[in-house]
Image: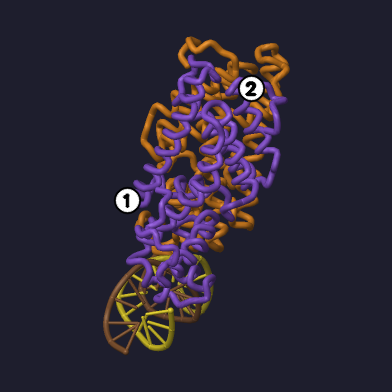
Chain colours: A purple, B orange, C brown, D yellow
Amino acid sequence: MAQAQTPGSSRRKAPGQQTRQAILQVAVDIASAEGLEGLTIGRLAAELGMSKSGLFAHFGSKQDLQLAVIETACAIFAAEVRQPALTAPVGRARLLALCQAWFSFVERKVFRGGCFFAATSIEFDSRPGPVRDQLAQVMKGWLSWLESLIQEAQEAGELNPNLEAAQLAFEIHALMWGANWVLQLHEDPQAIARARTAILHRLEIKLSVESF
Amino acid sequence: MAQAQTPGSSRRKAPGQQTRQAILQVAVDIASAEGLEGLTIGRLAAELGMSKSGLFAHFGSKQDLQLAVIETACAIFAAEVRQPALTAPVGRARLLALCQAWFSFVERKVFRGGCFFAATSIEFDSRPGPVRDQLAQVMKGWLSWLESLIQEAQEAGELNPNLEAAQLAFEIHALMWGANWVLQLHEDPQAIARARTAILHRLEIKLSVESF
DNA sequence: CCTACCGATCGGTAGG
DNA sequence: CCTACCGATCGGTAGG
C-alpha cells in the first residue's frame, strides 16, 4: 500500500512517472476536499496547466485515476502517521506517538480537505465498485493495525489487558474522525483537544502526561 | 427546523405542495447515499417519472433544492430520533432513549445511505456557501441539544456532575457516527454494539441494563 | 406540469 | 504530450 508503483531501485524516475506523480499530488488534495467524484479530469488538467487528454494518457480511465489517488494518499499517510509511530518504542509510547502524529497530520492540513480517508470512504460507502472496495480494504487495514498496537501495549503490561482491543480501536478511530469532522465543519480547534482528552481517558493515562 | 413550510392548519395541502413533498422524499434518500452534489435534477426527475423542468419549477435553483432537502431530512430526523427521546422522562432515561432511537434509526436505514447528516456535512465541509452554512448550523443545534440532555441528567443527579457536558456530547456523537460509518462501509452490524458499549461505559451504566 | 431548447462540462477517443 | 473532436449529461430557461 505504501510503496510506489516503480519496481526498480533507480533513483531517477522515467519522465512520464514524474508527471504522473505531480498529477497525483494535486489530485489527492482536490479529492480530500471535493471527493473522488468531485475530482474531474478537466478541473485537474486546468489546475496543472495541461490538456485533458495529455493528463488522461497517464490513466486508462477515471476509475484508474481514482484508484491511483487512493494509493498516493496511502503513501502520504504512511509517511506522515504510520512511520512516526514506528520510530517510538513498542507499547503505550507507540500508541501515544500514533495519536500525536495523527492529530498533527490533521492540524497541519497535510490534505487540503482534512482526512482524505474520512472524506472519500463516506463518499463511496453507497457506491459499489472497485473504488469502494479498495477504500474498505484500506480502512480495514488501518483498524487492524490500530488493534495490533493496542495488543502490543497490553502484552507489554502497559495497558489494561481486560479491554477488548478491537473495541478500543473502534473507539479511538471514532474519536479521531469526530475531531476531524468538527475541525473541518466548524473550524473549531478545540475538537482536537476533546478527542485527545477522550483517548487519553480510554488509555487510562493521567491528563498531565508529558508533552501530549 | 422540524415544521413543514405550510403555515396554515389546513389538512389538505395544495396540489403543488403534495408534489413538492413527494420530490423531497425521494431526494433525501438519494442525497443520503450519493450526496447533495450527486443528487442531480435529471436523475431525480427520472426516478420520479416526471420531466426535469416540471420538477425544477418547484425550486428556483439546485441550491434551493439542496436547502429544501436538508429541511426535509431535519423533519424526518426530528420525528424518528428527537421525538422518541422527548417521550421519555428527563434525565438518564431520556439520554438512553435518544441513543436507542438513533441506533434504531440507522439500523432500519430510514435514509437509504445511512445518516443523511454524516454523509452531507462531510461532503460540504470544504464547499463554502449557504448549503454548508445550513448544515453547520443544524449540526451545532444537534450537539447543543445533546449537551443539554446531558446537563439535565446531571441536574437530576443521575449522571456524574464532574463530567464536562460538551465533552461528553462530543464523544457520544463521535461514537454514533463511527458506528454509522462502519455499518455503511463494512456492512458490519457489530459496529452498533461497539458504539452502544462505549456510550454506556461513558454514561457509567452497567452493561446489563434493561433492554438497551 | 410539458416540449424544446441553451451553453458548459462531463468522461473518453482519434490521430498525430 | 497536443488539437480536435464525440455523445451524454449538467443546471437552467423560454414559452406554453
- Horizontal side of B117 relative to B191 (left or right) equals right
Please identify the quadrant where the C terminus of chain A is shown.
top right
Can you give x and y, in whole percent of width and height, for residue A5 in the image? 37, 58
Residue at label 1?
A129
Q: Residues within 10 Å of mark 2 (few under 14, many from 20)?
A: few
Chain to which mark 1 belongs: A
Residue at label 2?
A205
Relative height, residue A21 to residue B122 (above, below): below
Q: Is residue A86 visible?
A: yes
**Spatial CA span between label 2 and label 1:** 42 Å
At mark 2, the secondary structure is: loop
Q: Assess whether mark 1 and mark 2 are in contact (beta carbons under 8 angstroms).
A: no
- Comparing B30 with A161, the one in front is A161
Is the same chain shared between marks 2 and 1?
A: yes
- Horizontal side of A92 relative to C3 (left or right) equals right
Q: Residue at x 40, y 26 (%)?
A: B190
First of labels 2, 1 by sequence position = 1
Count of residue discs: 2
- In front of the other: label 2 or label 1? 2
Relative height, residue B160 to residue A36 (above, below): above
Q: Is residue B3 visible?
A: no
Can you give x and y, in whole percent of width and height, for residue A188 in the image? 69, 43
Q: Amino acid at mark 2?
A: Ile
Q: Amino acid at mark 1?
A: Gly
Relative height, residue B25 to residue B57 (above, below): above
Q: Residues within 10 Å of mark 1 (few under 14, many from 20)?
A: few
- Comparing A117 with B180, the one in front is A117
